[in-house]
Amino acid sequence: MINLLWNKSLRHFLLLVLLTPSFTRAQEQHIIKEIVERLAPTLPDDYDLSELTERLNYYRKHPVNLNHTSAEELKNFVFLSSLQISNLFAHILSNGKLLAIEELQVVDAFDLETISSLLPFVTLGEYPETEIPSFRDLRGRANQSLVFRYAQGLEKQKGYRDLPGSRYLGTPGKILIKYRYNYSDRFSASLVFKKDAGEEFFSGNNKYNFDFSSFSLGFNHLGRITKLVIGDYSLQFGQGLTLWSGFAFGKGPDVTSAAKKDLGLKAYTSSNESSFFRGVAAAIKVTRHIEFSPFISYKHVDASQSLLPNGEYGQVNISVSGLHRTRSEIKNKNSLGQLVYGSVLQYLSNNLNIGTIAYASHYENAFITGNRPYNALGFTGKDLLNVGLHYNYSFRNLYLFGERAQSPGGGAAMANGIMASLSHHLSAILLHRNYDLDYHSYFSQAIGENSDASNEKGWYTGLNYNIDKKWSASLYADIFHFPWLKYRVDAASSGYEAQGQLVYNPFKTFKLTARFKTKLDQQNTDSKVSLKYLEPVSKQNWRLETYWRLNRKISFQNRMESCRYQKGEGIAENGYLFCQDIDYKPLSSRLSGNLRLAYFHTDSYESRLYAYEDDVLNGFAFGMYNGKGLRSYLNLKYNLFRKFDLWTRYAIFIYQQTEAVGSGLDEIQGNIKSEFKIQLRYQF
């Protein structure tokens, strides 16, 4: 019966592919696509990265003048390393202002791919004088956009049935409404409303609003107040040990990304429901190089609480999923008050940054360690103080960076590193980290294997080598050790990770990428024994990918990827993925889009594979390919009018040899899982 359904589904699937025209998105999105793909394995599903694309789209319309910019502004370009930024300023200091963009080719560590990525967002034109805008300017010369997005799975999940126990109380549709206002780089406003699938919508516990809403006002260049944000905001300083909210890059093909580029204070515009502050924050220019950034935040966060012997409530950790679908999830919603206040004092210049951080966190209910052995050294109590010192300094072709963080009464965390341009073609990085068992911070995004900066020691090193104008290579290795227990690891453990990548880019319309990654760590044995011992866990990934543009309208991307997983002496588990993407974007047509056809086969969940998927504008999907089957999606964009754009997306999984898809309340009867999405944008 299953094979009959599979053969029938396969015929319908192939018919859809053959009869559907292939469409694409603009070529510039390929740069963003490569960046996001690096994050896919480490970020949760539906993580909102719209602030990244919105930032790049803003600079495409308002390019940065490379002769009149700062290190802080250039950090917005995530594909630029801190070493490249410092080398650019060193070049301008030695040789004067850039006369042509092509001059970047002689700046150390700048390769052709980086320059090509940077070109759409920079200029050498006249630098506009800063002026105080009038009310007419704020109304008529600003960029405004309103986005409405709706998505829904087309098959009914178990959680929406009339179950006697736990079930989803809301509707299956996902809704996002986002309003953005920008006037130059002086003033911005953001308003976000969001409802996840399964959450109640203007009913039940959300009778008068959406499940999540966010608001922010951002002001720049107000005399000595260089930044002021009212509402929701993010803070990113140092190397992410003491104070960092929002997403952060880690280990990846660009080996120098291990050195974080802190953006300081930013208005929060994402629909992600955690990792932000809510209140007021500012950056005040005390002198030419000294900046003071005070902040205060109060909001309620999700936590699963239990009654303590003293009659009060306590919790082990904070929930960051943002999902409020069932009675238990709704009970945990906004159950814990969180007050955070503090300040950052920094010395800032183009080649030197030294800063100190101090802030306090107060929670309405106390944290407890719980009954798991690996939680024995977790944070307890209601009040937590964090202080830190961070630095980065560039000298000639060297870039030194680091941070030390401390939770008084607890442990410390340190990360120190060096990057160097060893030649015009070769750059290297070396980073050491040491995170104590009892260092605690709820706002850290440091490099490492753990989700927080604790219980870890390690060395990271990497090389970027631009062999010539056509070939480039990168390699990194990371060795780590965990002195204390972890989840599913009941003893001290160690491991390593290494990745190599080779890129062949003979001309702008063709690119070939080969990548190999291997990782070895340790976990408790799966054997039924009274005393758990550790077994080695190894995983290797191979990827071969091509991108080529046939003409101005059509481009193709092909990928072949495999994975091999083995635990102890067990049988090795393998996974395979084959993808074909076709993009079509005629310059004069209102209609454009892209199409994917993929086949995957994995032996188990452990051998699953990830691949970035194109989506509607500022919508991202990290496809997880697990099991055996076919995957396809079609994205279409249509310019309705001069200021209206319409996107639609249809995506489908067709699985072989299965009678149900998913598990728990997400279970779907049958072998098909599909979703439809529509988005409308109005720009005015």
Image (cartoon, rainbow, N blue to C red):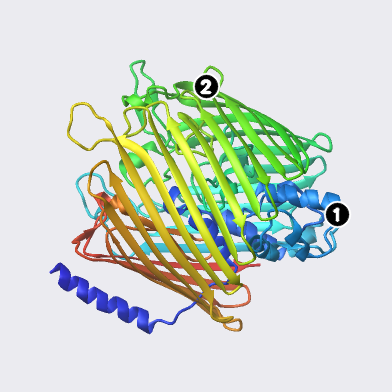
Q: Position of residue 165 (x, y in %)?
A: 21, 44
**347 left or right of 253 in image:** right
Q: Mark 1 packing: few (<14 Cα in 10 Å), some, or many (20+)?
A: few
Q: Position of residue 323 (x, y in %)?
A: 39, 46
Q: Is residue 244 above or below residue 102?
A: above
**553 left or right of 536 in image:** right
- Marking on residue 221: none
Name the amino acid, label 1. Answer: Asn
Q: Residue at x 56, y 19 (%)?
A: 408
Q: Quadrant of residue 468?
A: bottom right
Q: Nearer the viewer, residue 617 or 200?
A: 617
Q: Quadrant of residue 122?
A: bottom right
Badge nearest the viewer, 2 or 1: 1
**Alpha-carbon distance for marks 2 and 1?**
46 Å
Q: Nearer the viewer, residue 117 or 382?
A: 117
Q: Is residue 452 above or below residue 373?
A: below
Name the amino acid, label 2. Answer: Gly
Identify the image quadrant of the N terminus. bottom left
Among numbered discs 2 and 1, the one appearing first in the sequence: 1
Is residue 138 visible to us here? yes
Instruction: Please name the residue that numbered disc 1 is placed on.
Output: 95
Instruction: Please name the residue that numbered disc 2 is placed on.
Output: 411
Q: Position of residue 544 (x, y in %)?
A: 44, 64
Q: Secondary structure at mark 1?
A: helix
Q: Residue at x 59, y 71 (%)?
A: 506
Q: Secondary structure at mark 2?
A: loop
